[in-house]
Amino acid sequence: TKSAGRGSYRFYIEEFTQITRGRLELRRRLHNALQAGEFALVYQPQLNQQRQTVGAEALLRWSVDGKAVPPDEFIPLAEESGLIVPIGLWVFETACHQMAQWRAEGWQVPVVSVNVSTIQLREPGFTQTLLGVTQRAGVTPASLVLEITESQLLDESLYAIALELKNAGFALSIDDFGTGHSSLIKLKRLPVSELKIDKVFVRDIVVDVNDREICATVNALARTLGLEVVAEGVETEEQLQFLIRMGCERFQGWLFAPALPPRQLAEQWLQRQAS
Ligand code: C2E
Ligand code: CA
Ligand code: CA
Ligand code: CA
């Protein structure tokens, strides 16, 4: 009926206002989150076929009043507001200092991957800023992998910056690969050393022929271009076996471990340095 319709319309408006208010509140909180010390990094191990740790991805966590806000909610807010620039720098600094600290504690740390937004890439002097951070932390650029999502890297204006980062010694990885429709030509031109197969393709690899085809194609493509492949979102032994048969050599996912606080990552997933 008409009145019921109006009622649900009003309900919709109220709900919408609530969501908007929630977002505004979240945005306000995000402004103070760095100073308030509400951010933390957790690290998810990346393993090879022998299940040795070959790296770890730093993932950002934000808790407000003890409640975790999912990155997929606050990262877009941080990007829209430009706050991703200081937040992203904090992430990079924290990851570099963590790596130095692990090493000082006697742990072998291969590489650490850090997610970088293209809004950061466009900041003037970004490469120099990162180099300064690595120098102060006492780590080499070669021990860092910068993950940039495929859809964002397709913008030609970023090629020059990507090249600059590569020449400075950083490794670049294309995140969420397969979701951004890179052409072969573009991919060949990009100064990257790694592709990360998006977890949406790994999820149904056992049951969906198309997804399996996509994963196999990415692995073949990477071999042709001499790139590393990391499969993310590996949750089952079956998925792992399919990926291994395709020649994939690096894996990340809950089958092995979720993202862990620094101490736990070291104790469970890093080796002691031979002294
Ligand atoms: P991403 O870079 O694709 O990160 C992988 C996401 O998959 C992480 O979610 C991780 O916890 C999750 N994951 C890991 N293993 C599994 C698995 O086996 N199954 C499933 N279903 N998921 C798995 P998270 O931590 O919630 O991060 C979400 C996204 O937020 C990231 O996606 C990344 O795009 C963004 N993000 C996180 N930290 C940062 C950061 O420091 N800077 C920027 N710019 N973005 C970040
Ligand atoms: Ca990533
Ligand atoms: Ca990803
Ligand atoms: Ca993602």
Image (cartoon, rainbow, N blue to C red):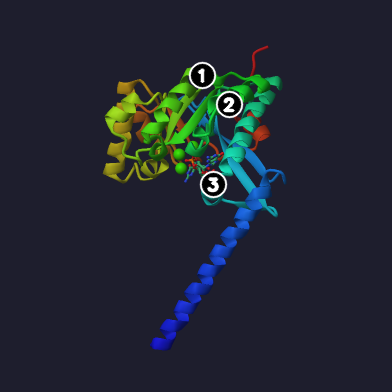
Residue depicted at 34% across the width and 41% down the height: 205
Quadrant where the C terminus sits is: top right
> Helix, strand, or loop for circle 1?
loop
> Helix, strand, or loop for circle 2?
helix
Q: Which residue is mark 1?
A: 168
Q: Nearer the viewer, mark 3 or mark 2?
A: 2
Q: Which residue is mark 3?
A: 75
Between residue 244 and residue 124, name the one nearer to us: 124
Q: In whole angstroms, how far apart are the C-alphas of marks 3 and 2? A: 20 Å
Q: Are marks 1 and 2 in contact (CB under 8 Å)?
A: yes
Residue depicted at 32% across the width and 35% down the height: 182
Q: Label 1 sits on what residue type?
A: Ala
Q: Is 37 left, or right, of 211 in this rendering? A: right
Residue 130: mark in rendering: 2
The vertical placement of 12 against 66, above or below, is below
The vertical placement of 110 against 88, above or below, is above
Pick whichever of labels 1 and 2 is earlier in the sequence.
2
Q: Position of residue 198 (x, y in %)?
A: 40, 39
Q: Nearer the viewer, mark 1 or mark 3?
A: 1
Residue depicted at 63% across the width and 36% down the height: 90
Snapshot quadrant of residue 163: top left
- The single residue placed furthest to the front in the displayed view is 124
> Helix, strand, or loop for circle 3?
helix
Q: Label 2 sits on what residue type?
A: Leu
Q: In whole angstroms, how far apart are the C-alphas of marks 1 and 2? A: 9 Å
Q: Sort mark 3 into few (<14), some (14-19) or many (20+) by Cα contacts within 10 Å.
A: some
Between residue 245 and residue 258, name the one nearer to us: 258
Indicate yes or no: mark 3 CB to ligand 1 under 8 Å.
Answer: yes
